[in-house]
Image (cartoon, helix red, strand yellow):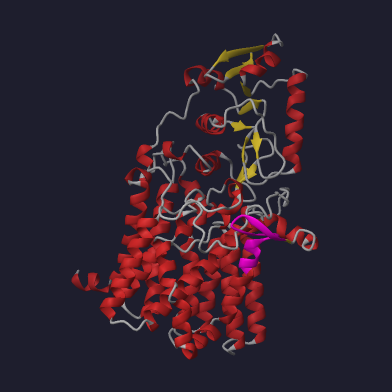
Amino acid sequence: MRSFLARIPRVPLLGALLGLIWFLARFGLPALSFTNIDWLMEGDWNQHALGFLHFRISPWGFPLGKISTITAPVGTNIAFTDSNPWVSLLLKPFSGILPTDFQFIGPWLCLSFMLQGVAGVWLGQRITQSKIGAILAAAFFVTSPVLDNRVGHPTLCAHYLLLFAFILHVVPEDQSFLARRRNLLGLGLVALTAGIHPTLCLMILAVILALVIQQVITRRLTWLGGALHTLTLLGVTLFVWRILGIIGGNELREAGGLGYYNADLATLVHPLDGSRLIPRLPSHAGAYEGLGYLGLGAIALGLFLPGLALAHAQESWAKVRAHLVLMVLCLLLALLAFSIQWRVFGTEILNLDTLTKPLRPILDPLRSSGRFIWPVHYLLLVAILFASWRFMPLPRWALVALWVACLALQMGDAKRNAVPAKNHRADWYHMQDEVLAPLAQGKTKLALHPIMLWSNGPGCDADEWPRNIFQQALYFAYRHRLAMNGGYIARSSKQHQQACEDFPKTIAEGKFAKDTLYLVHPRRVADIVRWPEMECHPAGPDTFGCVLK
């Protein structure tokens, strides 16, 4: 037993513990309960949680991520509810034994913070060649404001995968870690991330392509080998996206928002609302997608970077030259993050809209382009940690004390906006099941009237409904295994738009279906009760349940 325990890598475990502590400080233990869904019924979390619940009750089909019970009859995809396709696919076969109320978002977020700590330790070991340095470096990665900013979109919190991709650039090249093995691990990272989130996948794909190019330049890989591996990376990405349904469907690529959800040029030092000590500085509303703030502690440590790099110019240049391809590709991603409207503290200084018109078919799907600042954020953080640890003319104890002080500043400045799961009220569900459940017996469909479908593409936004009608109606539909005509999805199609246009016509013409329960807003109930074959019952403060007699 002792020999087994002795083989456990304790330093990475400490990194995982740091991530766990930081997660619990933000969300608390209730977020880890698989049956606690109440805290998720706000913001975009409800879209992700309910997307998985409906995926559970949708029949298997192709693509594998198809959800037939949201925005029916057109349906949608697990990726377009941002419900973590790989995890959802892994859990779906066990749906019959899982609790009815089930969520994995809290555990996923916890895992993301813990693996951020593990990856931070491994990267820190390469940076510092020291156990204490590795643990402190992991703390900087765990408390990164960029990671903290993305908890509203849990799949985008898999930043540890980006760190693992960086690690492949810095592991020693020896007989135990040949280029082929490194490339296979890179391919695995790309395939894994392709089934988590497309945006994150593109970042990691760029980092792994930088590794391939660097190997070709240094002749560890032939030109033919590099070309074949590049094609394999692209092919695996497209293959995963196709089988999951992320591509190949009828969803419109043009979603709007390009140039709005981008990064400010000052993003690395601009905290937006993420700092307790720095007041809110001017910015545009969509800048939160491009938050690249290093954190006050990392910025304080980074003030030494220019001087240290100049004082050790030869070694600094050697490091730059060894990772030049990676740096160039990360900077290209940063240009994509700044998008077509460049702003400094919210003030536009350059507009590339006209110049980039020919590229819009490629750029438009990347509407939230500001996220592509993350590789530069982490690359710069690595550079700051490396230079301060290697070049700072201080005794080791004084250097450790400096890092601890900067970490204390980083953590103290962090402004965590998410309410812990234990503080969320469970009063989000206002419909009266005692009225609706009998009406739902024998039904297979749930229809909102007016239909409400939110999307970054075509949709139907019914202003009468309260915002929380999505989670209430979708949850009811899930509990009673009904396909609902509305929903909240990331991408929609012309078919969705056509459904939005057709449904009011069927109501106006009195074409009601026997297998459908109609949820009707009080302002529209007159559209239903004027037909003698229909009956309606109050089922909540803003809802009537209507069925054919």
Residue 356, how many percent across, how many down? 77, 62
Depth order, front residue of 211/7: 211
Tell me what residue is drawn at x 42 percent, y 39 percent: 39
Whether residue 9 is visible = no
Q: Is residue 357 above or below residue 419?
A: below
Snapshot quadrant of residue 359: bottom right
Residue 43 in picture, x, y percent from top left = 51, 41
State which quadrant residue 413 falls in: bottom left
Q: How many marks?
A: 0
In this picture, is 238 found above or below 44?
below
- What segment is highlighted magenta in the picture? 333-350
Which quadrant of the rendered structure holds the N terminus? bottom left
Residue that appears at 35% across and 65% down: 407
Which of 387/222 is in front?
387
From this viewpoint, is residue 153 visible? yes
Q: Nearer the viewer, residue 130 or 111?
A: 130
Residue nearer the viewer, 464 or 99: 464
Q: Is residue 58 above or below residue 445?
A: below
Q: Say which residue appears at 71% left-offset and 50% top-offset.
A: 249
> What is the residue that sits farthest to the top in this orientation?
532
Spot occupied by residue 457 in the image (x, y as percentages of width and height): 70, 44
Residue 173: percent from the left, percent from the top?
Answer: 47, 86
